[in-house]
Amino acid sequence: MDIEQLRAMLVVAPFHRWLGLDIAALTADELILEMPWRDEIVSNPMIGSAHGGILSALIDLTGLYTINALGGSARATADLRVDFHRPAISGPLRAIGRVVKLGKQLSVAETRIEKADGKLLASGRGAYVA
């Protein structure tokens, strides 16, 4: 799958469009998605941090699209694990996905969410049904 096909898939779902997802890079080993900051994702106005559900969704979507982009088939999420390392506070979010295993029935990908400066905000692993 090339970048243009992947971009077309990303904009099909209204939620993905609302998130503003874009492909920053696609290599033989990883997919990097970027999401702009939106005030609507803030859940703790005291510190201005993003809701964990948004970070979880970004991990989930990045894993699914990483598998599709790198030769596998992912249609639905079977399992998702997320770890939150530090609050996501303003600025664009970068999600880096890597395939762990491509399978005929189930594939697995890992994703890291980082700030622009490379600081780790969240990480996770998803299993996806083909």
Image: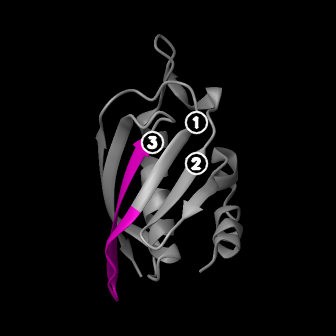
From the viewer's side, name the closer residue of 63 and 33. Answer: 33
Which callout, 1 or 3, points at the residue further toward the start of the chain? 3
- At x 48% / y 59%, what residue is drawn? 62
What percent of the width, then of the height, locates residue 98? 38, 64
Q: Mark 3 points at which residue?
A: 55
Quadrant of the snapshot with the N terminus: bottom right
Q: Determine the main secondary structure of the stretch shown in magenta.
A: strand
Q: How many marks?
A: 3
What percent of the width, then of the height, locates residue 106? 32, 79
Badge 2 marks a residue whose secondary structure is: strand
Three-letter residue code for mark 3 = Leu
Badge 1 marks a residue whose secondary structure is: loop
Three-letter residue code for mark 1 = Pro
- Tell me if I can see residue 22 in this picture: yes
Q: Distance between the residues labelled 2 and 1?
A: 7 Å
Which callout, 3 or 2, points at the residue further toward the start of the chain? 2
Tell me, yes or no, whether the two marked residues, 1 and 3, touch with CB atoms within 8 Å: no
Three-letter residue code for mark 2 = Glu
Determine whether, in the image, residue 127 is placed left or right of residue 43: left
Q: How is the image coloured?
A: one colour
> Which quadrant holds residue 38?
top right
In the rendered image, the vertical position of residue 124 relative to residue 38, given as above or below:
below
Q: Name the residue under label 2.
A: 34
What percent of the width, then of the height, locates residue 89? 49, 24
Tell me, yes or no, whether the two marked residues, 3 and 2, touch with CB atoms within 8 Å: no
- At x 44% / y 82%, what residue is drawn? 72
Question: Mark 3 against mark 2, which lies toward the viewer?
Answer: 2
Magenta span covers which residues?
A: 98-113
- At x 34% / y 62%, what residue is drawn? 126
Q: Name the residue under label 1.
A: 92
Badge 3 marks a residue whose secondary structure is: helix
Tell me, yes or no, whether the two marked residues, 2 and 1, touch with CB atoms within 8 Å: yes
